[in-house]
Amino acid sequence: MNGSQPISPARQAAVNGLAMVGFIALVGAGVWLAIYSTRFVPTVVNGVGAAAVYLGSVLTPAPDSSLSVVPTPTASTTIPFGTATTTSATTTQVSPAKPSKPSYPIVTAPAPPAPYGLPDLAVQISAVGYVTCDSQQCFVPSASVPSGYKPAVKFNVKNNGTNVTGIWNLNVSVPGQDQKFDNLESMLPGAEATYVAWVTDARTASTQTIAVTVNYDGSVTESNTGNNTSSANVQVL
């Protein structure tokens, strides 16, 4: 007798059950920690560092040349005839000719001139407000931003020049940070794009100035650089 006793099947089953419960608990704790990190760690990082800026846009192309239909004057359908003259016992009757159908030629408007000269990027903030989600579709125009929401501005960028811009750059400035957006899509003359920029970290009540500058690095040669910056104040409650 060495003092050891064989483990009964019931006891072995209980031990196995406890081991399985412990393994499931460890897996659950790992999943919970991963979710916690995903949800809360970015908020802590944003609170320590500068605010990040996000950007959404909708491009409106330059207007196309239109077609117009111009009717030609309709030919007269009244044809005068004199009284028929009887030269014999037989009477000759003359019927008027059938009117011709009017024609409608399609006139094409003159095509816009080929690009020439220089482009002219112009920016204008059209509204201030906030977003309720991370999308330009969630923009809400408002003079003030309720606590817990992200302040935002909506602005338009238009090429007022006579030539294409090529790729161009944009800078959005918020307190403590300049956020640059490079290699934006080239714009034809007359084309316009609407953007919404929102700040991810604005938890303290304050008046924040958001400024937008197109072609901030001068990489695009323009005919006018006096319309490259627009700014507005956003009141965070």
Image (spheres, grey):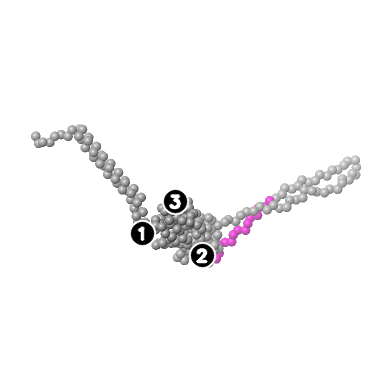
- Mark 2 vs mark 1: give the one in front: 1
Which is more N-terminal, label 2 or label 3?
3
- Earlier along the polypeptide chain: callout 3 or callout 1? 1
Q: Residues within 10 Å of mark 3 (few under 14, many from 20)?
A: some
Instruction: Name the residue tied to disc 3.
Output: 132
Tell me where residue 55 appears, x and y as whole percent.
45, 56
Indicate whether residue 157 is drawn in magenta: no
Instruction: Kindly identify which residue carries mark 1.
Output: 49
Q: CA distance from mark 3 to mark 1?
A: 22 Å
Q: Quadrant of the C terminus?
A: bottom left
Where is residue 25 shown, x and y percent of the image?
27, 42
Q: What's the magenta bit mostly, secondary-structure-wise?
A: loop
Tell me which segment is drawn in magenta. 104-122
Give the spatial CA distance, label 3 vs label 2: 30 Å
Determine the secondary structure under disc 2: loop
Residue matched to label 2? 227
Q: Secondary structure at mark 3?
A: loop
Q: Residue furthest top?
A: 9
x, y percent for residue 101: 72, 47
Q: Where residue 18 is drawn, which disc sits there? A: none
The kind of secondary structure element at disc 1 is loop
The residue nearer to you, when weighing 165 against 234, is 234
Is 33 rendered above or below residue 182?
Answer: above
Q: Residue at x 50, y 66 (%)?
A: 225
Along the line of sight, which residue is nearer the eye, 100 or 54? 54
Front-most of residues 190 and 145 = 145
Instruction: Kindly indicate the quadrant of the structure image that contains residue 208.
Output: bottom left
Measure how far apart labels 2 and 1 are at the Cα level. 31 Å
Picture quarter containing residue 61?
bottom right
Amino acid type, residue under disc 1 in the picture: Gly
Indicate which label's residue lies in the foreground, 3 or 2. Answer: 3
Q: Is residue 100 left or right of residue 59?
A: right
